[in-house]
Image (cartoon, rainbow, N blue to C red):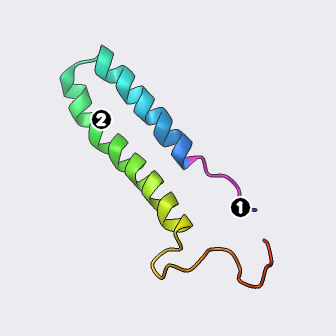
């Protein structure tokens, strides 16, 4: 079994943190922070989906002979 990377959990925490920043801080800081937070989150969720869907060739990620890692 692969070790967990926690990318999606960090992305969710960044969304919560950004929501807090939106409510409490100035608009200028939000304009700076919104692109890195959304980029990281999109990549974290997108790469997870891409990996689970089989990648470019659409092949399953598990071995076809029934073995498990």
- Disc 2 crowd rating (10 Å Cα; few below 14, some 14-19, many 20+) is few
Q: Which mark is residue 58?
A: none
At a point 55% along the width and 41% down the height, the residue shown is 9
Taking the image as shown, residue 25 lies to the left or right of residue 55, namely left
Horizontal arrangement in the rendering, residue 11 relative to residue 66 (left or right): left
Residue bounds of the magenta highlight: 2-6
Q: Position of residue 40 (x, y in %)?
A: 40, 48
The quarter in which the N terminus is drawn is: bottom right
Tell me the residue that label 2 is attached to.
33
Lateral position of residue 26 relative to residue 58, left or right: left
Q: Residue 62 is drawn in which quadrant?
A: bottom right
Comes first in the chain, label 1 or label 2: 1
Tell me where residue 23 sits by quadrant. Answer: top left
Residue 63 in the image, given as x and y percentages of width and height: 71, 80
* As drawn, 5 above or below 14: below
Magenta stretch encompasses residue 19: no
- Which residue is the site of mark 1? 2
Locate the C terminus by quadrant: bottom right
Residue at screen point 28% across, 43% down = 35
Q: Main secondary structure of the magenta part?
A: loop
Residue at the far top in the pictured view: 24
Characterize the local packing of mark 1: few (<14), some (14-19) or many (20 or more) Cα atoms within 10 angstroms.
few
From the image, state whether disc 1 or disc 2 is nearer to you: 1
| Percent coordinates x, y for residue 42 in the rendering | 38, 51
Look at 49% across and 60% down and name the residue there. Answer: 49
Provide the secondary structure element on which disc 1 rests.
loop
Q: Residue at x 45, y 78 (%)?
A: 56
């Amino acid at each position: 079994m692969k070790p967990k990377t926690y990318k999606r959990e960090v992305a969710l925490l960044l969304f919560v943190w950004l929501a807090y920043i939106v409510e409490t801080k100035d608009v200028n800081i939000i304009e700076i922070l919104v692109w890195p937070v959304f980029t990281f989150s999109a990549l974290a969720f997108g790469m997870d989906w891409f990996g689970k869907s089989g990648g470019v060739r659409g092949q399953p990620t598990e071995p076809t002979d029934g073995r498990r890692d």
